[in-house]
Image: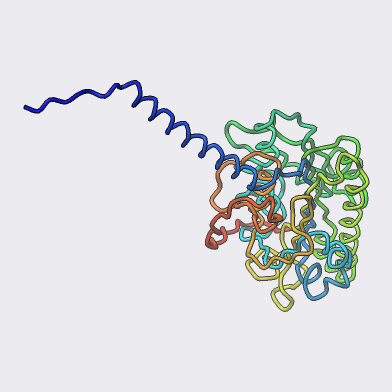
Amino acid sequence: MIGFQARPLGAFAAAVATAIAALIAVADGDAAAGETSGAAPLRTERVVIMVIDGVRYRESLGERGAELWPNVNGPLAAEGILGRAFENRGLTATNPGHAAILCGEYQIIMNDGSMRPYKPTLFEAYRKATGAPAGACWLVSSKRKLAALSHSRAKGWGGELGASVDCGRDGGTKNRDDAATFARALEVLEQEKPTILVVALREPDSRGHGDDWEGYLAASRASDGYIAKMVEAIDALPHARGRTALFVTADHGRHDDGRLDGFVSHGDGCNGCRQLPFYARGPDFRRGFASETKAEQVDIAPTVGRLLGFEMPPTKRGRVLEELFAPASAPAPAPVPAPAPAPKSRRGKLY
């Protein structure tokens, strides 16, 4: 039997330890390099969402956009992003449309303000994640019934996590003119310094339902002015300038010309009701960009979460709108879900 002379284990172990240490050092260096060369930290600290009730794409970004929305289609377009394929794929009515924006989920809820969403709102998600007070989130609306969207009826969420509310006038018993609502929104932006501010204007929808074509066009034109003034206010306030992302869209459109009663109503799945204007501007977004990527109302809430560092509860469809982000701050691409059939409407007025 051949004998073996044992090699001292101490030297062997030391050699192995030296090799492992070298590998770890290389790995750490690669990781650090990856962190350095990855996405830059986001600069957005506040978000404003403006919802223009019932304005069609045609009278905002489409055929008559240059005439009726000259600010958004002109100088503001160079500062942000226009969405050319943005839709409401759920119920094309006021409260369901606003709920889709705020919750990142299409829901069948009553349109009269008697029913809260059954999915948590971005107000609740932000406050739960951060411990922020109610004053960090505000909902300012011309329509009183939108107060029902300040928080959800979801178990474990609810009013203690909801937004501060100023909806309608006379204690929320009547609707309010857009001029007064916008003035109040600017006051909240300046004095309360909210992290999330949602401003909902009603007059294009109200004029449309009144069969007032010229009034509807004038209200659409006025909405463009409010958007421009909001940008001016953001840029003038030290706590908002360079730190605020602005989203502008609609809750629903209106029937296509020649369909049913045309611009007077809405509520079905025609292109006029579904295709919506979309504009976004912020320190982490592209500039002078027109997006042809299909996007939906339910994508806004997850995108706000990405900007402010919190996550919305899981939804069936909502995604981060990664196409909005400038390359240095772009999140990892996510698959775009296939279109889902729109939920069936319940009986009742859609306004």
Name the residue at 70% across, 65% down: 291
Name the residue at 64% across, 65% down: 293
Whether residue 277 sits left or right of residue 234 in the image: it is left
Give residue 313's quadrant in the image: top right
Residue sticking out furthest to the bottom? 258
Task: Name above or below for residue 272 compared with residue 297.
Answer: below
Residue 28: image location, x then y, percent: 54, 37
Residue 206: image location, x then y, percent: 83, 59
Q: Is 314 in front, or is 77?
A: 77
Task: Name above or below for residue 245 compared with residue 293.
Answer: above
Residue 134: image location, x then y, percent: 76, 31
Whether residue 97 sits left or right of residue 156 in the image: it is right
Give residue 17's quadrant in the image: top left
Name the residue at 75% across, 64% down: 289
Total tally of numbered discs in the picture: 0
The C terminus sits in image quarter: bottom right
The N terminus sits in image quarter: top left
Q: Is 294 in front, or is 270?
A: 294
Residue sticking out furthest to the left? 1
Task: Name above or below for residue 308 compared with residue 333.
Answer: above
Give residue 253's quadrant in the image: bottom right
Residue 236: image location, x then y, percent: 93, 46
